[in-house]
Image: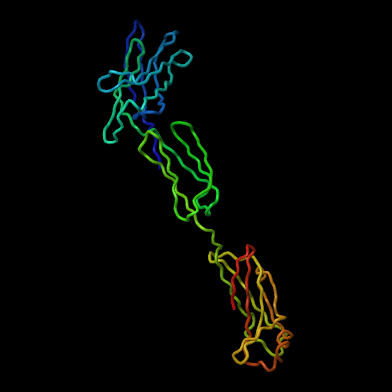
Amino acid sequence: MFSFLQADLFFSCISIKPAILTSVFLSAPNLLRVGAAENIFVEIQDCASEEEVSVEIAAWSFPGKTKKLASTRVRLTKEGHFQNLGRITIPADEFEINPKRKHYVYLQANFGDSLLEKVALVSFEPGYIFIQTDKTIYTPNSNGKYGLWSMSFDPHFSYHGSLPKIPGIWKVIAKFSTSTQSFVSEFEVKEYVLPSFEVEVKPLQPCFYVDSKELKFSIEATYTFGKKVDGSAYVVFGVMHENQKESISDSLQRIPVSQGEAKITIENINTIKDVNSLVGETIFVKASVLTENGKNDERK
């Protein structure tokens, strides 16, 4: 998603001293960001001197070179292999910010007897901001946290607070005060809805014979995404006689859905009518499933 300005420009100049041949180098990013500290690398190669060398790194106005915009001084020593990093910050108020116009500075490294200079492009985009929320989905009025990471200034900010009450897609937007570029991260606010499930009741025998002792039914409850439901089933049986439903009150049973089996016995049926008078009639079962978190579904 993000790219970093890591490509460096290498400029070299050879200066000749008596009996010593040395090369001096200046390395800097392709793009210098105004308002942000930039690292500038300087080096003297093949230096046989025991003395340290002071190098001034400076940025000058372009094209007139009438004003020194920023500068720093570093020491190159034998112990440090005659190389070092200097940091300069080019102030943003030295430029008229215009996204359609390119701005440049002169970048110099003055080694005393050698001067390296290059025209460098400047950018008003001070860097990148990474935005991360602790969740991607929140419920209305819940508390959320989000963090901001900057590639240029303070490395990390963290905030937390109440989120919007209105469901929808929301955005966290951040930008530097000196920049026109915005950085965005999205999150969703939505009401929590319990997952739906289906209840299926199946007889384990095709019919109830008058000499049977019981008739069993299997009860299965499955979420729409395929997982079995954990909970309880409340089951009651009845008889359809002359187009009238008559429940058998003492047939009410509570069973775990994980086992998923309920039964009606001949004793249950005899409480309302003699089983022999019900030949050809229909037995019905009503199952109401309650999940562990309280959601209810019912099947007949």
* Residue 118: quadrant of the picture: top left
Query: Is 178 situated above or below 274?
Result: above
How many marks overall? 0
Hey, which residue is sitting farthest left in the picture? Answer: 64
Hey, which residue is sitting farthest right in the picture? Answer: 267
151 with respect to 15 (left or right): right
Comparing 268 with 109, the one in front is 268
Measured as percent of width and height from the top left, residue 234 is found at 66, 73
70 with respect to 81 (left or right): left
Comparing 243 with 140, the one in front is 140
299 with respect to 55 (left or right): right
Instruction: Report the quarter where the N terminus lies.
Output: top left
Measured as percent of width and height from the top left, residue 140 is found at 52, 54
Query: Is 294 situated above or below 33?
Result: below
Measured as percent of width and height from the top left, residue 213 is found at 73, 85
Instruction: Report the quarter where the C terminus lies.
Output: bottom right
